[in-house]
Amino acid sequence: MKKVLKGDEPPLLRSYRQMVPHGEWNQMRNDAHYGGQQAYKDCRIKSIGDQKGLCAYCEIAIHDNNPLRCRVEHFHPKSDTSTAHNWALDWQNMLGVCNGGGNPHQTAEGFHLDPTKANLSCDAHKDKMIQAHKLTEDCEGWILNPLRIATSPALFRLEKSTGYLLPDIVACAASPLYTGNRHASVEALVQHTIEMLNLNCDRLAKARLRIIWDIEQNKKKQRQSGFNAQQGLSNLAQRYFRSYWPGFFTTIRLCLSQAAEAHLHAISYAG
């Protein structure tokens, strides 16, 4: 999971909310009046674009805006009507996410791997945990919100033998306090996020292992081309982190370590 930096709210969403202040998400999606249908499409396109084409949780590439592969997730439950605030149409409450491995007919690499239930992730698994009463519907403070985490340092470390993401104990200890954290520490918050979003399911772990293997092969090619370890890693950082972020951004970032951090700093990475 990486920092998500939201851009400006789509104008049609703002105007629709002004015209239908108590409108619901699916109502807007199907509303032929007040620009509702186009506002819904704009929210999808803008969310994915702001996130550089990556799922806000697992970082699978969703840049093609395929309805079978991605959707808009409301971090705070859009059904919450306890106050006058309309969470369903709150632009800052929307994230672009993958389908979480929930489509049995989607076999593209990284998106689905049987058995489906064991390989649910992201908001699909989050909803499953809510239904099982293992996570409150209002999950702020129980799991990380990609909109609220810092760009650096990464709070995760990578177990290269398994492809698992784990809390980085040092980074978590050095990280500023996460406002509203319901856990005893940032480390516990990160661990709970991994579990509630099932970020180490077999499907995602295997996808990360493929990335790790690819990077190791490219490191070897750099050595064979005569570059020392530092220069080779620097070359790879420049290659991987071009204008649009690659899928599994954090995996690549952790594999390239200080070379990645130096390059991201040089290009003023903000999310």
Image: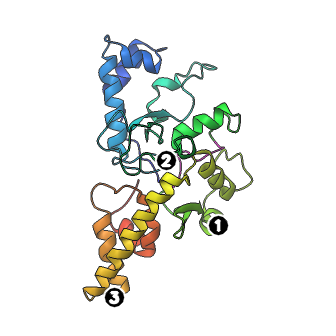
Residue count near mark 1 (Cα–Cα under 10 Å), binned few <14, some 14–19, many ≥20: some
Q: Residue furthest left?
A: 225
Q: Which residue is mark 2?
A: 57
Q: Is residue 171 left or right of residue 102?
A: right
**Is residue 147 highlighted in magenta?**
yes
Element at label 1: helix
Q: Position of residue 43 (x, y in %)?
A: 36, 31
Q: Which residue is mark 1?
A: 169
Q: Is residue 83 left or right of residue 25?
A: right
Q: Position of residue 244 (x, y in %)?
A: 29, 54
Q: Which mark is residue 228?
A: 3
Which residues fall within the magenta stretch? Answer: 141-150
Instruction: Please say whether residue 246 is visible from this viewpoint.
Output: yes
Mark pair 1, 3: CA separation: 30 Å
Q: Earlier in the sequence, mark 2 or mark 1?
A: 2
Residue closest to the eye, 102 or 79: 102
